[in-house]
Amino acid sequence: MSTKNSYLVFSGTNTRYLAEKICQSLDCPLGQLVITKFSDGEFAVSYEESIRGRDVFLVQSTFPNSDNLMELLLMIDAAKRASARTINAVIPYFGWARQDRKDKPRVSIGAKLIADLLSVAGIDRLITMDLHADQIQGFFDVPVDHLYASGVILPYLQGLKLKEMVIASPDVGGSKRANTYAKYFGCPLVLCNKTRARANVVESMQIIGDVKNKNVVIIDDMVDTAGTITKAADIMKAAGALTVRACASHCVMSGPASERVQNSSLEEIVFTDSIPYTNRCAKVKQISVADMFAEAIRRVIHNESISNLYLV
């Protein structure tokens, strides 16, 4: 069996747009998979071609709603029962990752639960990108290839050729990620110190650092309701920043996010296409990570190192 015929790529319903681009980059057809929906909301998965002895790559981001996760679990189970040689979950956006620890009494650790579900279902490898917390890799007992959106975001920022650039983090928790970008560009780092009234609601925010007459780039891993990132942009603009733009890996953009971004001081906000974005906002731009994931899959197939895929 040739290398090209030894693997197959399949997709769940809502990540098909990305799987098709990955297959185009790999120069292979997207595998034939049927997901049958029942009137009560239940669904069933069946492969329409033989996968016996094949390495299968299942592309599905686990963003809400939970059907995306359930589809992936059923795809894994069906592949295991159809005698696939290896089952590789390709999850560009790993949902529930914000629940990575007990930060108060009597709470769930959602990221660990999802890791257990995927492991019990039968995955042999996880390929993902920009986990909300790096330590989630340790929740798995199988190899985890953790890619970084910086592979596509850094070249984009270089193309802007911004003068007097400053990298900013919207919160202290993201300082390590932002500091990596600042070191790469050799520019200053600015932090925002925020306190939350409750989930998704920012109570207060202060800037630590100088943004006057600077072109600020805010770096984050995901934008959900856009409350933090738009508040940070407005405060920085008021503090004398020339321009403020944002780059984030995952375009969650739920609830009032699009409206907030449109009405904010942000010049633009750049995401990858790990999650489909259906709302139209003139300030939102998406860069594809399909080639990066295709290259990771290609290297897994050929047992090659993926470490030099990382720019930083």
Image: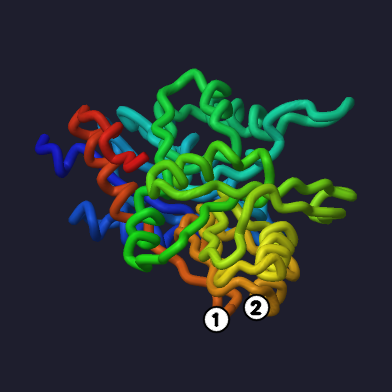
Task: Give the mark count.
Answer: 2
Whole-number angstrom distance, CA of label 2 to CA of label 1: 7 Å
Which residue reaches farthest top? 141
Horizontally, is 186 left or right of 102 in the view? left
Residue beneath the point at 66% across and 55% down: 65
Q: Position of residue 164 (x, y in %)?
A: 46, 62
Horizontally, is 285 left or right of 7 in the view? right
Horizontally, is 192 left or right of 139 in the view? right
Secondary structure under the numbered disc 2 in the rendered image: helix
196, 254: nearer the viewer: 196
Q: Which residue is mark 2?
A: 262
Q: Position of residue 64 (x, y in %)?
A: 65, 54
Q: Position of residue 42 (x, y in %)?
A: 65, 52
Residue beneath the point at 67% across and 63% down: 236
Secondary structure under the numbered disc 1 in the rendered image: loop
Q: Earlier in the sequence, mark 2 or mark 1?
A: 2
Residue 197 visible somewhere in the drawing = yes
Instruction: Find residue 304 and name its label.
Output: none
Horizontally, is 230 left or right of 35 in the view? right
Quarter of the image where one finds residue 279: bottom right
Residue beneath the point at 32% across and 61% down: 21
Q: Amino acid at mark 1?
A: Ala
Residue 47 visible somewhere in the drawing = no
Q: Amino acid at mark 2?
A: Gln
Q: Position of residue 224 (x, y in %)?
A: 67, 57
207, 231: nearer the viewer: 207
Instruction: Find residue 282 and name its label.
Output: 1
Disc 1 crowd rating (10 Å Cα; few below 14, some 14-19, many 20+) is few
97, 141: nearer the viewer: 97
Residue beneath the point at 57% across and 79% down: 280
Image marks 2 and 1: residues in contact by CB distance under 8 Å: yes
Q: Quadrant of the C terminus?
A: top left
